[in-house]
Amino acid sequence: MLQSTTSTVVSRRKLLASAAMATGLSMLSDAVAQENNPAANVVDRGADLKIKSLRGFRVGTKAYLKIETNHGVTGWGEVTGLEPNVAVALAQSLFELLDGENPTRIEHLWQKLYRSHRDMRGGPFMTHVISAIDVALWDITGKAWGVPVYRLLGGPTRDKVRMYPHAKAHKIGTGGPHPYSADPAEIERLVKMVKDTRERVGKDGTVMFDAHCAIPPAMLIQFANAIEPYDILFLEEVAVPGNIEVFKRLKQHIKIPMATGERDRTIWEMLPYLHERCIDILQPDCAHTGGITQMKKIATLAEAYYVPLAPHCTCSELGLSASIHAAFAVPFLLIHEGYLDGHLMPAGVARKSWDQDKDGYASLPQGPGLGVTVDESMFEKVNADPKRVFKWPKPTLPDGAVRDY
């Protein structure tokens, strides 16, 4: 009995010793493998980056935001569709939530800003400013890693992005205030605008019509039925956001593809259009909806419903470039809005790194981050131009009543 017990103890000791040796060899083998594994030796170059300042600039009717870091890497973002002095003040107040943070934690910082105050969550003032901050953070992160922003978004899904306005792609405006229901002459005037534009761009060209939330539903139905023969790409901003039932009603009566989204912010305001299947094309604005971060999420939601994006954009080359980066990384994209004629911002204030070819397509942006160079020395000149001063709109109907526009 004693011999048997002793033999068992010895066997256990040998087993444990063998196991320890095997574990040691395994750990050594793993260590060597990790040392030779490139994926295990990636240096997080953004780990010690910290935000040290945020500066806001009024630049005409827009605001530019500049975020600086402790390593000298800077990022730029643009606020549009908001009174610029208010935008600057709000951005500088929000810096309290960004000071000392790692700028490459973009999603975390977006959530921190957006959900920071329960009573201001989702509002246009807050979301427009967050959009610019978000874009600046993507700019910094791209520069820190030495790659264009679209690379951080999964890489380009296309070689070029189709844009308008262009000689073969034109969008018509509403041409003034409109009544709740129209007489024949009013409808005929709008129809003629569509007909003339179709003849100008030809059958191989693209025509869009922007109702701009200014044509009330009854009249819009009258008008849409009259322009069916001219095959427009889409009818934009068919109703004022806020009541999904209006969009559902219009969808029941209008056969033309309908588009909207420039005045809707974040995934939460886009979702009802998709869920109710009352919009054919979504038009999020990178500077309105929550920046590049939200643009990518909105695109994913829309993809699930097989709805393409046609991003709205009235930014200068700074904000436009941010939107173009997002557009390159979006699988379902129809066309992109962008104005390069200088009416939004004089040439040279923000210089892009992409070109537009003779067919209206934008090329891939070049360089790290957004690939945009901002000339701060031109801000004062822009602000001295009386034509570039923000003024509150005063839209009225012929009888003096306030109207949508």
Image: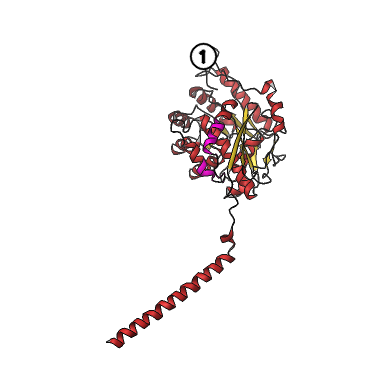
The percent coordinates of residue 180 (x first, y second) are 50, 19
Question: Circle 1: is it few (<14), some (14-19), or many (20+) Cα within 10 Å?
Answer: few
**In the image, farthest residue toward the left:** 1
Q: Which span is picked out in magenta?
A: 90-109
The answer to which of 4 and 326 lies nearer the viewer is 4
| Residue 260 in view in this figure | no
Which quarter of the image is occupied by the N terminus?
A: bottom left
The percent coordinates of residue 389 (x first, y second) are 64, 22
User: Element at badge 1?
Assistant: loop
The answer to which of 163 and 287 lies nearer the viewer is 287
Q: Is residue 204 magenta?
A: no
- What's the residue type where badge 1 is placed? Ala
Q: Residue at x 65, y 26 (%)?
A: 60
Q: Main secondary structure of the magenta part?
A: helix
Q: Residue at x 48, y 72 (%)?
A: 24
| Residue 114 in view in this figure | yes
Looking at the image, residue 405 lies above or below residue 337: above
Answer left or right for 250 relative to 41: left
Q: Residue at x 39, y 79 (%)?
A: 13
Looking at the image, residue 90 lies above or below residue 102: above
Answer left or right for 256 relative to 8: right
Q: Is residue 100 magenta?
A: yes
The percent coordinates of residue 79 (x first, y second) are 59, 32
Which quarter of the image is occupied by the C terminus?
A: top right
The answer to which of 265 and 169 lies nearer the viewer is 265
- Residue indicated by mark 1: 401
Quadrant location of residue 385? top right
Question: What is the number of callouts on the image?
Answer: 1
**In the image, farthest residue toward the top:** 399
The answer to which of 134 and 314 lies nearer the viewer is 134
The percent coordinates of residue 391 (x first, y second) are 60, 20
Answer left or right for 371 relative to 211: right
